[in-house]
Image: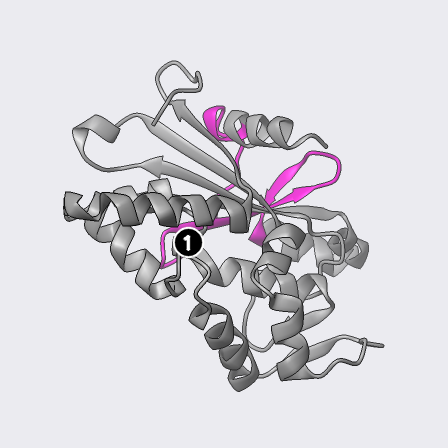
Amino acid sequence: MDEYKIVELVKDRYRTGLLEVYHNFLEVYHNFLLNDTTIISDESYKRSYQHDPSISKQVIGYVNYRKTSIVSDLEFPTLFNWDFISSAHLYKKGYLIRGLSLFGPAPLPNLKYIIHCIVSDTRYEFKDRLVIELVDLDVAANNLNLPKIVSSVLGPKLLSENKIIEDDELDKIEKQMLSQKLFADHTWDDAETIVYQYFDDNKRELSKEVLKISEAYEQVFRPRRVVYNTKTWEPVVF
């Protein structure tokens, strides 16, 4: 499916109230995009899996819907939600993460996209905005060196059956990923801090550094990003 059509699909599902949501304590709503263009909540997916385990092979996208009052989160959704990429990559490769139900009870071998659908709940000038950012999982994982990192932590052998990853193994993978200086010679945490200070603390002297981080962000994630006005539902410049 064309990436822009997926973005439009996610927008229309949200606009018409058909984007299924499940309330949890983080106020983040987790949904799955199936290859027939259906979008279902994580709870619906888990119930369906009990009756038809083959549904795990139908999942092509993970849709993360939330509201935010942080401008930098609207500008850099994937930077501020790094754990989705690492966990999704592991599930695609056939691993399961102990205690993590976010991606369900089974690997997702055909998972291709991570999609952030974010409603602005922030200052006046950013009201009435819906940001949708789609990232190709394989492109992002390769640019983040995740295949090499996973191999160094879990071993290079191909899986013959699903393997459960322990907390300490996941921690090692995430620490290695986050410690890389992929964002204009900044680590992931440092890049987050800089863009937050610029957009949310109004430290405008950081503009040149933010521009460099933005360029690196585009190179690493190659995002398909569209911002909609939630009154007209037309694409706008953020």
Question: In the rendered image, is residue 185 in sight?
Answer: yes
- Residue drawn at 41 percent across, 34 percent down: 131
**Is residue 26 covered in magenta?**
yes
Q: Position of residue 204 (x, y in %)?
A: 16, 43
Q: Position of residue 187 (x, y in %)?
A: 39, 65
- Residue drawn at 58 percent across, 78 percent down: 98
Q: Position of residue 144 (x, y in %)?
A: 56, 61
**Front one among 207 and 67:** 207
**Front one among 62 and 53:** 62
Please identify the quarter of the rendering in which residue 108 is found. bottom right
**Amino acid, disc 1:** Leu
- Residue drawn at 54 percent across, 76 percent down: 173
* The residue stretch that appears in magenta: 13-42
**Front one among 10 and 140:** 140
Q: Position of residue 7 (x, y in %)?
A: 56, 31
**Is residue 118 covered in magenta?**
no
Q: Is residue 213 left or right of residue 173?
A: left
Q: Is residue 66 left or right of residue 176?
A: left
Tag 1 residue: 79
Please identify the quarter of the rendering in which residue 97 is found. bottom right
